[in-house]
Image (cartoon, rainbow, N blue to C red):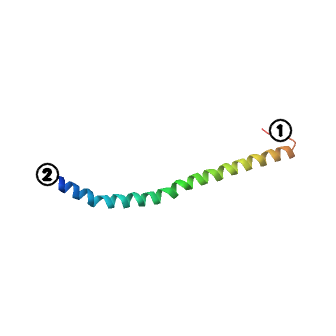
C-alpha cells in the first residue's frame, strides 16, 4: 500500500498541532529547569567569595599570612 500525496498532506496537517503543542510544553518545562542550575551556581559563587573573605579576615586576626 502506498500513500498518495494527498494522504501525506492530510497526515502532515493532522500532526502539525500535536508537534506544536508538544514542543510548547517541552519548552515550558525546560526553561525553569535550565534556570535553576544557573541560579544555584551564582549562589555558590557568592558563598565562595564570602568564605574567602572570611578566611582572610580570620587569618589577619590570628596574625597569619593569607594563603
Q: Position of residue 53 (x, y in %)?
A: 77, 47
Residue 19 sits in quarter = bottom left
Going 36% across and 59% down the picture, which residue do you hit? Answer: 20
Secondary element under disc 1, as helix, strand or loop, is loop
- Left or right: where 65 falls relative to 14: right
Q: Which mark is residue 65?
A: 1
Classify the position of the C terminus by image quarter.
top right
Which residue does the numbered mark 2 point to in the structure image? 2
- Left or right: where 48 falls relative to 54: left
Q: Earlier in the sequence, mark 1 or mark 2?
A: 2
User: How many C-alpha atoms fall within 10 Å of the one at disc 2: few (<14), some, or many (≥20)?
Assistant: few
Q: Position of residue 23 (x, y in %)?
A: 39, 57
- Left or right: where 10 falls relative to 37: left
Q: Position of residue 30 (x, y in %)?
A: 47, 56
Q: Nearer the viewer, residue 13 or 36?
A: 13
Identify whether 52 is placed above or below 32. Answer: above
Residues at marks 1 and 2, CA–CA distance in whole angstroms:
81 Å
**So how many labels did they put on this image?**
2
Amino acid at each position: 500500500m502506498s500513500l498518495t500525496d494527498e494522504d501525506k498532506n492530510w497526515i502532515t496537517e493532522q500532526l502539525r498541532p500535536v508537534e506544536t503543542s508538544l514542543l510548547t510544553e517541552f519548552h515550558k518545562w525546560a526553561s525553569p529547569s535550565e534556570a535553576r542550575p544557573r541560579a544555584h551556581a551564582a549562589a555558590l559563587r557568592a558563598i565562595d567569595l564570602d568564605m574567602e573573605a572570611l578566611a582572610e579576615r580570620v587569618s589577619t586576626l590570628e596574625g597569619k599570612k593569607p594563603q
